[in-house]
Image: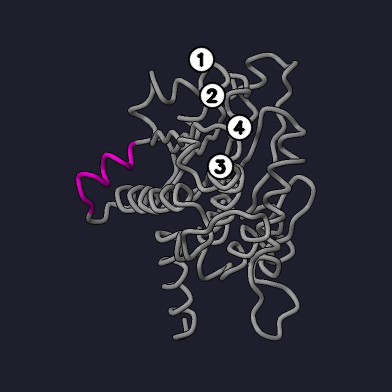
Amino acid sequence: MGKGNHKHSRQITEWRFNPVKWVEDIFGDEIVKLRNAAGMRTLTKSGLTLQQEDVLRRWGKFLEAKYRVNKKLSFTDEQEALSKKIGFSIMSSNGNGKDFLLALINWHFMATCPYARCMVTANTGKQLKSVYWSELAKIRSLARKMEGASENLLQSLFTMQNDVMYANLEKEERGKRWFTEAVTINVKSTPDEQGEALAGRHEDWMAIFVDEAAGVPDAVFKPIERTLTGLVNVCFLIFNPTKNTGFAIETHTKYQDKWECIHWDALSCENIQASQP
């Protein structure tokens, strides 16, 4: 491997465990411009809200903990405890930018983790395709272009289709490795059938993203723990606490020891504050 490849590999590793720097380097001031155009306050170099940046930092520490512990490298007691958790669960009302953050984290995982395999689902097909997939496409378009390039970095490295996005590998591997797939849950199917929706996938670097998790049938989550057994496997849920029962809310109560639980206070978010009189 040449010196250029070594440098590239070091850069990817740095970005993997420092996702805020990845956002700053890949998007430049494009997110800042997006927020300014929408009349939102910007308090960070990345353009993200303080809440979003805080989650990204915790996300980077989480990935590093999983990697170091499962690779049997040196690690701290804090990293060992963190590595045993399933993933993240963010509870928040509307307007805090949680869909944008989830899609951004999806892109970060795809862009920095080798042969990443991701699944994303939501409470409805409309939410999955019209909201979440739209956020993925928007973020892809925001990456800055290198001088003289016709496409930005994400556009050149990844192809997006209606229900899958994949790395532009050799032709025979495209769409078969290193991809994110949209998984629509059939609410009319049996609990056993729903439980198979996210089961049966395995990869060293794998992530499950769930949008509006409070509306996803509980049966869908049953196989998650036994599915996430690879080197760095994680689940990331976001939801609006519209129900006081079900798996999503239980990640903050009954199963809180297994999750990085985050409750966003709407009044502390720049998005919400900007819209107040």
* Location of mark 4 (residue): 198
How many residues crowd around disc 1 within 10 Å: few (fewer than 14), some, or many (20 or more)? few
Q: Pointer 1 and pointer 3: residues touching (CB < 8 Å)?
A: no
- First in residue order: circle 1 vs circle 3: 1
Position of residue 117 in the picture relative to residue 77 (left or right): right
Q: Position of residue 56 (x, y in %)?
A: 45, 52
Q: Note whether 49 is above or below 37 in the view shown.
A: above
Amino acid carrying label 3: it is Ile
Give amino acid for label 4: Leu
Give the residue at mark 2.
241
Q: Is residue 68 left or right of residue 114?
A: left
**Residue toward you, 72 or 77:** 77
Q: Say which quarter of the image contains residue 167.
A: bottom right
Q: Main secondary structure of the magenta part?
A: helix
Left or right: residue 238 versus residue 17 is: right
Disc 3 residue crowd, few under 14, some 14–19, many 20+, Cα 10 Å: some
Q: Which one is nearer the viewer's eye here, 102 or 198?
A: 102
Question: Residue at position x 37%, y 47% from top?
Answer: 62
Q: Are marks 4 and 3 in contact (CB under 8 Å)?
A: no
Disc 2 + disc 1, Cβ < 8 Å:
yes
**Mark 4 or mark 2, which is nearer the start of the sequence?**
4
Locate the C terminus by quadrant.
Answer: top right
